[in-house]
Structure formats: C-alpha cells, structure tokens
Amino acid sequence: MTHDLFELDIAEGWYTREDCFVMYDGETPVAAGQIRTEMQNEILVGFLDTLGVPKDIQGNGYGAELTKCRIQILLKLGVSEIRTEVEQNNQPMLKLLLKLGFTRV
C-alpha cells in the first residue's frame, strides 16, 4: 500500500486519523491498524480492530510491533480490558495474541 492509497482510504471513510495507526519504514507504510474504546457495564473496554500488512512484507514483525503499540495506547487510555476478534485460520495472529497474554473465549 502506498501513502497515496492510504490517504484515499481515509478520504473514503475506511479509517479515521483518530483511531488508525500506521507504521512506516521510511516513507512506506508497512502496517495499519485501528483501535476503539467503548463503555460496557461501566467498564472502559478497548478493542484491537483491523490490522493490515501488505502480503509481500508479512512475517517481518511489523504487525506484531504495531499490535504492541496499539495495546500500550489502549492501556494509556485507561481500558480495563482489551478484546479482539481473529479468524480461526489466521494462525500467525492467534499465536501472537496468545504470546501477548490474550486468552481464547
């Protein structure tokens, strides 16, 4: 994904600058992911939403690093719990989340 394509995604409403984080290698975006928070039963819950890494550079740790950063941001926002959904066939992400302390529900 190029910077221009990412800007187009923002313009089309796929992401907002407030909830989307982009990791760059130089001037090239290498990972993008969203977060959000919501109150549930008087508890602030954080969510790790979409994460994208171009296929040709997957496996280089960009998604893992951005996920760790997103977790830290949610914790700084004061969430009591962090949730996410992952497709069962996405073994790399499942493995990463388990390594980071997430549990399957």
Image: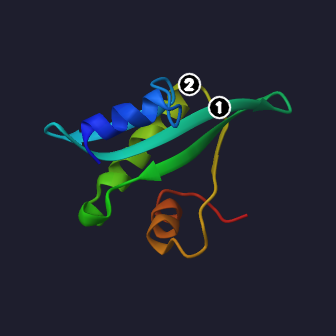
> For residue 105, what is the image quadrant?
bottom right
Quickly name the residue at label 1.
Answer: 37
Residue 39: where, in percent of width, then height?
77, 29
Q: Is label 2 in contact with label 1 (beta carbons under 8 Å)?
A: yes
The residue drawn where x is 58% and y is 58% is 102
Q: Position of 6 compared to 30: left or right?
A: right
Q: In what element is the residue under mark 2?
A: loop
Does dot 1 land on a helix, a strand or a loop? Answer: strand
Q: Quadrant of residue 38?
A: top right
Q: Position of residue 32 (x, y in %)?
A: 39, 43
Question: Badge 2, how many Cα within 10 Å: few under 14, some, many 20+?
Answer: few
Mark 2 or mark 1: name the one nearer the start of the chain.
1
Q: Nearer the viewer, residue 11 or 79?
A: 11
Q: How busy is the neighbourhood of tag 1: few (under 14 within 10 Å), some, or many (20 plus)? A: some
Q: Percent x, y for residue 15?
A: 50, 34
Which residue bears the numbered disc 2?
Answer: 77
Pair 2/1: label in front: 1
